[in-house]
Amino acid sequence: MIAQYRLKDRYGIDPSNVDTWKLKVDFGLDEKIVEEYENMRDGNGIIKLTLSLDFKLLKDLKDEIGDLKEDKELLDLLSKRNSSILAHGLEPIDEKTAKRFYEKVLEIARRSIKDFNKKIEWSEFPKL
């Protein structure tokens, strides 16, 4: 979700309906790269990005978090999460892995989202 937020917030790109004209004109992406995204259109003519493609587009835009797609620790943690009951699988996830995944996501969020800590404070349930 962080990659999607970054695309929307920083670049005004909707990852569920990518506008290739914007990629070409507003961001000056190479014609070959734009064509790659054009070839991703579904039967309705819409380009919907997966998590991996969100990071690919960020990398194509030369965004600092675009390289996270190649972060081996993050990929390993995502794989464990995806296989777990927390996501798509049935495998239990151990506490150490869950805590490290949480820390990694917080680290990425702090780098990616402006005023992240303030937004976290605003989202806390009020204490009476």
Image (tube, grey):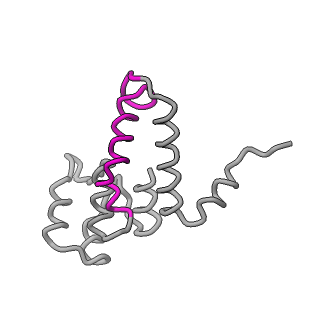
Q: Quadrant of the C terminus?
A: top right
Q: In front: 16, or 88?
A: 88
Q: Tell me residue 3's x, y (percent).
A: 40, 56
Q: In front: 24, or 116?
A: 116
Q: Tell me residue 94's x, y (percent).
A: 47, 28
Check if residue 43 falls in the magenta segment.
no
* 92 lies left or right of 15: right
Q: What residue do we see at 55% from left, 66% from top?
A: 114
Q: Main secondary structure of the magenta part?
A: helix
Q: What residue do we see at 13% from left, 68% from top?
A: 32
Q: Number of labelled discs? A: 0
Q: In front: 5, or 113?
A: 113
Name above or below for residue 83 compared with residue 123: above
> Magenta segment range?
65-91
Q: What residue do we see at 15% from left, 64% from top?
A: 35
Check if residue 70 falls in the magenta segment.
yes
